[in-house]
Amino acid sequence: MKNCDQFRELIEAYALGALDPEDRAALEAHLAAGCPDCAKAVEEARWLVCQLAYTAPEATPSDMLKGRLMQTVRAEAQSERKPRMLPTKNAIPSWLWVGVAALLVFSVYSAWTTRRLQNEIREANERAATLGIEHGRVLEQLADAKREAMIMMDPTSRKIALWGEHAHPETLEAKWHSQLGVCIVGDKVPMPSANHVLQVWFIPKKEGAKPMPSAMVRPDANGKLMLYVSAPPESMDDTKAIAITEEPAGGSGWPTMPILWSGKVT
Amino acid sequence: MFLAAFTSSGPREVPLDATLLSRLMQKDVSAFEQLYDRHSRLVYGLVLRILQQASTSEEVVQDVFLQLWRNADQYDSSRGPFVPWLCTMARNRALDHLRLKSERQRRREDQPEELPSVVVAPDYEKALDEKRRAERVRALMASLTPQQKKAIELAYFEGLSHSEIAATLKEPLGTVKSWIRNGLLRLKEGLQATT
Ligand SMILES: [Zn+2]
């Protein structure tokens, strides 16, 4: 029977995964018997071993890898997150489900938004026809398109004007629905520089809180912009303002460029 | 007044990994993207060092980040730092890839894998930024004897055990054990002394 001191000699190699089976079994039995000192030493050694990762030279994976990942992640986010964010049917007035496209006529950006939503719905239907198995997901995409429309149309959505700074005099409009999320639409939006995106920031009310990074978008070729944030970082009442800056593609964790548009939430 | 919200928080800070992870649990795509942009070079470098082959390494890195995306809730950010945990997952996956060659084992790889348990930072852990930490660890590794360094690298990057390393280096088992232990203890002392 070995004592703790002898086990201590095995702990670094154990964390490294270098123990031969016999030593490993002995140490694991000792740990399983509940030795808090050795358990703590193992934790420390595991952390130490993790530091060895830094001795590998950093390398940049291909953009293709990131592209594949982001594609997968976006698709999964649509099929996984949204249903949870979706309020129960009863919470949505039924009139909103009916004739969404027709109601959009009243929207400032109606023509474009309507066309876009119609296209999305048509594409979703086509996909549903070819891919029977994906039906559920397609229906969720449809629900997404409808949800954007509902945010724009629901009279309870709070309208927030995002005023442009000197270089960008056009005003964007955000609509914040307490349950469905935030939609931001804009027209004649200047194109960000190459490899840059427009990134949305939510500024919490809390004193000293940092701007929370959110969705990124590039306007289309005609300068139309529509962006949907299903889960803003804070509730409407806890958010002071929404702002938009131009950031390098991929977005930033902290605004690195001047604010282009901003508006007070309350 | 509103602009003050941007400027009053002192130096430009990026959100902590923990903040991004909590957003990841709500399936926040931009949080995922930020974590990827922040850590993919380290993770890919590690996996590439283990597998020595770009396309397989990218597959593994893809697996690792997808696991992170799908199972972020298994990571408890209150218990330990994120990067060591992520690197553990990446190393485990890469070493599995290295070891598992048979068809049967390959199939097993497709199944979702247990994520590593949280890596708890020791009391002596210093809050170094990633760049300084990497520099520090590299400098400390370079200060080990060539034998200590070689033995640790064979274990860490090639997944070899004590006796496999002894056979590879044609050195006595006891010697290899002490190279590894003394090397790691020296690394630990160096990190403890780092301010
Ligand atoms: Zn013990």
Image: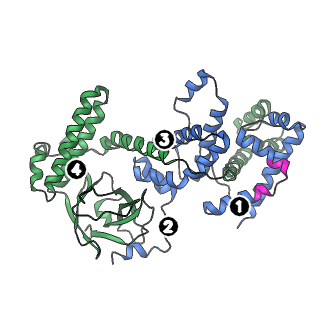
Q: Amino acid at mark 1?
A: Arg
Q: Which residue is mark 3?
A: B66
What is the secondary structure assignment of the residue under circle 1?
A: helix
- Asked if labels 4 and 3 share a chain, the reply is no
Magenta span: chief secondary structure: helix
Q: Amino acid at mark 4?
A: Glu
Which of the two labelled residues, at mark 1 and mark 2, occupies the earlier sequence position? Answer: 2
- Which color is chain B depicted in? blue
- Residue A25 marker: none
> To which quarter of the image does residue A14 belong?
top right
The answer to whether residue B146 is magenta is yes
Q: Position of residue B191 (x, y in %)?
A: 73, 60
What is the secondary structure assignment of the residue under circle 4?
A: helix
Q: Amino acid at mark 3?
A: Leu
Chain with green colouring? A
Q: Which residue is mark 2?
A: B13
Classify A101 as above or below B16: above
Q: Which residue is mark 4?
A: A148
Nearest to the observer: residue B91 or residue B55: B55
Q: Is residue B46 visible?
A: yes
Q: Amino acid at mark 2?
A: Glu
State if disc 2 and disc 3 touch (CB < 8 Å).
no
Q: Which residue is mark 1?
A: B136
The boundaries of the magenta stretch are B140-149
- Asked if labels 3 and 1 share a chain, the reply is yes
